[in-house]
Image (cartoon, rainbow, N blue to C red):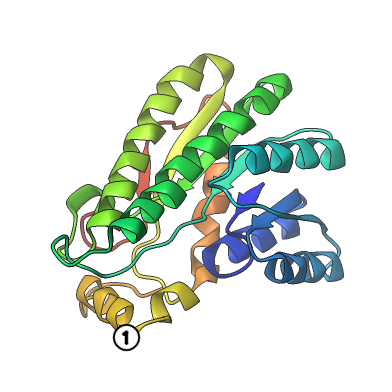
Amino acid sequence: MVTGAGRGIGKAIAQAYARAGAAVCCAARTETEIRETVREIVAAGGKGLAVPTDVTQPDAVRKMVKATVEAFGGLDILVIDAGIGELQSVEESDPELWRRTIEVNLLGAYYCAQAAIPAMKKRGAGKIITLGSGLGHRGMGGMSAYACSKAGLWMLVRVLAQELAPHQISVNEMIPGPVVTSWAEQTAQATQALGKEASESEWVKTPEEIAPLAMFLATQPSKGPTAQSFSLMRRDN
């Protein structure tokens, strides 16, 4: 099950998992986008399911998990990719947008993990993979809501890993670093923020270049790494 699977990193991960033989539930708010992701998966010989989902709504998230289990017989892997962010200083920020960022990036991840845990326990093992950010470890001026949401997500990863270790469910964070996506390109300000993070020595990636790390984490043994942060950035987090 991959949230944010309609485009960008989430779509690339969903397609990579499908190519490897996984049946993938593709979730996002925009139904047309996830249906296109599933259409491409099926056209390539894979199995996919499109479930329109707003991760900020607990009932919708529970329905997403239920649909996945009913369609595929269980749930083994959850990739939490859905996220938003804007460039704005604390002083000039819109409180509603600040709240919304925390709601999507942190509360949405909490709702997804909470709903997925019982299904994974029934399988006897599982993997939860979150899309974190270097900004959640070191911050950046002008990105307070996004950085705080990702910092909270990193702590959630560590706490969940402690709680779920007895059940053979690993929980890890992957940090893509600078990635060229529609989210990063939607405003000139966001593009400038991307430029600040990506110096000449940094690796600016395509979404498809993130997929191998997601594949690595999905294929680790049940007693493999947990509570870890895996970064594709060339510099420190």
In the image: residue 59, left or right of residue 155 = right
In the image: residue 115, left or right of residue 138 = right
Write down the residue under mark 1: 188
Residue at point 73%, 39% (across, down): 63
Residue furthest bottom as drawn:
188
Question: Which quarter of the image is occupied by the C terminus?
Answer: bottom left
The picture places residue 188, in percent across and down from the top left corner, at 32, 85
- The answer to whether 177 is drawn above or below residue 155 in the figure is below
In the image: residue 155, left or right of residue 200 = right
Where on the picture, by quarter, is residue 183?
bottom left
Q: Residues within 10 Å of mark 1 (few under 14, many from 20)?
A: few
Residue in the foreground of this view, choosing between 8 and 16: 8
> Does the rendering let one see residue 134?
no
The picture places residue 171, in percent across and down from the top left corner, at 47, 33
- The answer to whether 45 is drawn above or below residue 175 in the figure is below
> Does the rendering let one see residue 119?
yes
Residue at point 54%, 58% (across, down): 212
The picture places residue 51, in percent across and down from the top left corner, at 74, 53
Q: Inspect the image, locate mark 1, and give the three-letter code of the amino acid beneath it.
A: Ala
